[in-house]
Amino acid sequence: GAGVSQSPSNKVTEKGKDVELRCDPISGHTALYWYRQRLGQGLEFLIYFQGNSAPDKSGLPSDRFSAERTGESVSTLTIQRTQQEDSAVYLCASSSSQGSANSPLHFGNGTRLTVT
Amino acid sequence: AQTVTQSQPEMSVQEAETVTLSCTYDTSESDYYLFWYKQPPSRQMILVIRQEAYKQQNATENRFSVNFQKAAKSFSLKISDSQLGDAAMYFCAYRSPLRDDKIIFGKGTRLHILP
């Protein structure tokens, strides 16, 4: 596709279950970002990939959160033993390395996670 | 560390009028990039306009323009001839050329357009 694709668009899960969120970036974009956005709030940085590497994982809220990226393409964000405070919209964005910092982020539509 | 502040949680403007959203930031870097993103109810963040700090000329994109005051570390967004489709959350963002990993976003301003 032409844009960043995220799936599922909505996910309702029971507390304690594991969930996996998927992001398909724009083809050729080497940089990939995950953000969390709680209701009515701003964007909270979670993790960044350059290629398949994540140089800094300190943004992940707890050890229940993990992320990986393969083939410099698809990324998955996994939340284990979900808690109600994990309820939020999870946004993925990708960016071209060409032009570096001037390159804007291209966002997906997000996954709305609701933990009951 | 860099910070981005949007001091107006909500604003309203009459359709066809002009509105200015404020953004200030703090940084010790001399070169950087600033962005305004729009997030409509559909949730997808869309780039509105960008500004490179070493360029003195204010960026303009159709009805959207910025007032970039580097010394004051201010980056406001002006929307002219406001339209109903401009209703959204607007986020100001800072990006350092030295660190690709973290792009600092403000907390956002919700803009209402009054018909």
Image: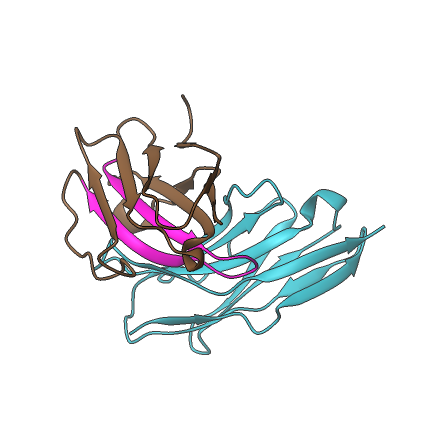
A2 drawn magenta: no
| Residue A72: image location, x then y, percent | 19, 32
Residue A6 drawn above or below residue B48: above
Nearest the eye: A42 or B72: A42
Horizontal placement of A24 versus B80: left or right? left
Residue drawn 17% across the image and 32% down it: A70
Q: What residue range appears in magenta?
A: A29-50
Residue drawn 56% across the image and 48% down it: B39
Nearest the eye: A34 or B60: A34
Residue A73 drawn above or below residue A47: above
| Residue B103: image location, x then y, percent | 34, 57
| Residue B59: image location, x then y, percent | 51, 53
Quarter of the picture containing the N terminus of chain B is: bottom left
Nearest the eye: A113 or B7: A113
Q: Is the magenta stretch mostly helix, strand or loop?
A: strand
In this figure, what is the number of numbered marks? 0
Horizontal placement of B49 versus B83: left or right? left
- Colour in which chain A is drawn: brown
Query: Visible in this render: residue A23?
Result: yes
Q: How is the image coloured?
A: by chain
Residue furthest bottom as drawn: B72
| Residue A92: image location, x then y, percent | 37, 42
Residue A109 drawn above or below residue B49: above
Residue drawn 68% across the image and 47% down it: B86
- Colour in which chain B is drawn: cyan
- Splitting the image into 4 quarters, where does residue B14 fall? bottom right
A39 drawn magenta: yes
Residue furthest right as drawn: B115
Query: Visible in this render: residue B57?
Result: no
Residue drawn 33% across the image and 71% down it: B2
